[in-house]
C-alpha cells in the first residue's frame, strides 16, 4: 500500500510539471510572476516526480541488488544548481526562450 501512495505522488509531480509548462506556453506574454511560478512548478514537480519514483522503488523492494546513488553526485549537484539558476535568469531576460528553459 505505501508504494501505491508513492506511485500516485509521482503522478502528482508529473502533473505539476506538465501543467506548469502548458500554462507558460499558453500565455503569449507572461509577466515576471507567471514566469517564476512556472519555473518553480516545473522544478519542484520534477523533484517530486523523481523522489517519489525512488520511494516507490524502495518501498516495493525493487532495489535489492543495486544502490540508488548517482555516481559523482557531489560533483554533479552544484553544476546542475547553477544551470537551474541560469535557466531562470534566461527565462526572465528573454521570455521567448522560456519554453526551452522549462524542458
Image: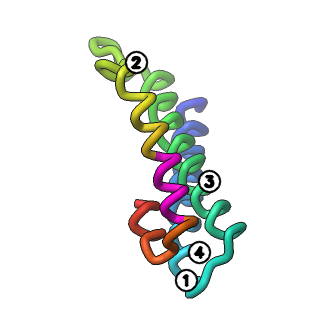
Do the numbered discs 2 and 3 sit on residues whose CB atoms are within 8 Å? no
| Horizontal side, residue 31 vs residue 94: left or right | right
Q: Residues within 10 Å of mark 1 (few under 14, many from 20)?
A: few
**First along the sequence among labels 4 and 2:** 4
| Secondary structure found at label 3 | helix
Whether residue 48 is situated above or below residue 102 in the rendered picture: above
Q: Disc 4 to disc 3, how far (Cα)?
A: 12 Å
Q: Disc 2 to disc 3, how far (Cα)?
A: 23 Å
Q: Residues within 10 Å of mark 2 (few under 14, many from 20)?
A: few
Do the numbered discs 4 and 1 sit on residues whose CB atoms are within 8 Å? yes
Q: Residue at x 52, y 65 (%)?
A: 91
**First along the sequence among labels 1 and 2:** 1
Whether residue 7 is situated above or below residue 11 in the rendered picture: above
| Secondary structure found at label 2 | helix
Whether residue 8 is situated above or below residue 93 in the rendered picture: above
Q: Residue at x 61, y 63 (%)?
A: 38
Q: Give the residue number, with chain letter if any, for mark 3.
A: 40
| Secondary structure found at label 4 | helix
Query: Bounds of the magenta span?
Result: 84-91
Q: Give the residue number, with chain letter if any, for mark 4.
A: 23
**First along the sequence among labels 2 and 3:** 3
Q: Give the residue number, with chain letter if any, for mark 2.
A: 74
Q: Disc 1 to disc 2, how far (Cα)?
A: 37 Å
Q: Position of residue 59 (x, y in %)?
A: 50, 23
Q: Give the residue number, with chain letter if any, for mark 1.
A: 26
Q: Nearer the viewer, mark 1 or mark 2?
A: 2
Q: Nearer the viewer, mark 4 or mark 2?
A: 2
Hey, which quadrant is residue 23 in on the image?
Answer: bottom right
**First along the sequence among labels 3 and 1:** 1
Amino acid at each position: 500500500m505505501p508504494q501505491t501512495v508513492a506511485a500516485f505522488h509521482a503522478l502528482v509531480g508529473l502533473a505539476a510539471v506538465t501543467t506548469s509548462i502548458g500554462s507558460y506556453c499558453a500565455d503569449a506574454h507572461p509577466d515576471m510572476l507567471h514566469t517564476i511560478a512556472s519555473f518553480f512548478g516545473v522544478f519542484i514537480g520534477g523533484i517530486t516526480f523523481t523522489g517519489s519514483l525512488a520511494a516507490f522503488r524502495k518501498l516495493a523492494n525493487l532495489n535489492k541488488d543495486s544502490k540508488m546513488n548517482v555516481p559523482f553526485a557531489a560533483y554533479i549537484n552544484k553544476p546542475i544548481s547553477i544551470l537551474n539558476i541560469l535557466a531562470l535568469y534566461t527565462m526572465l531576460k528573454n521570455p521567448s526562450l522560456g519554453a526551452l528553459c522549462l524542458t
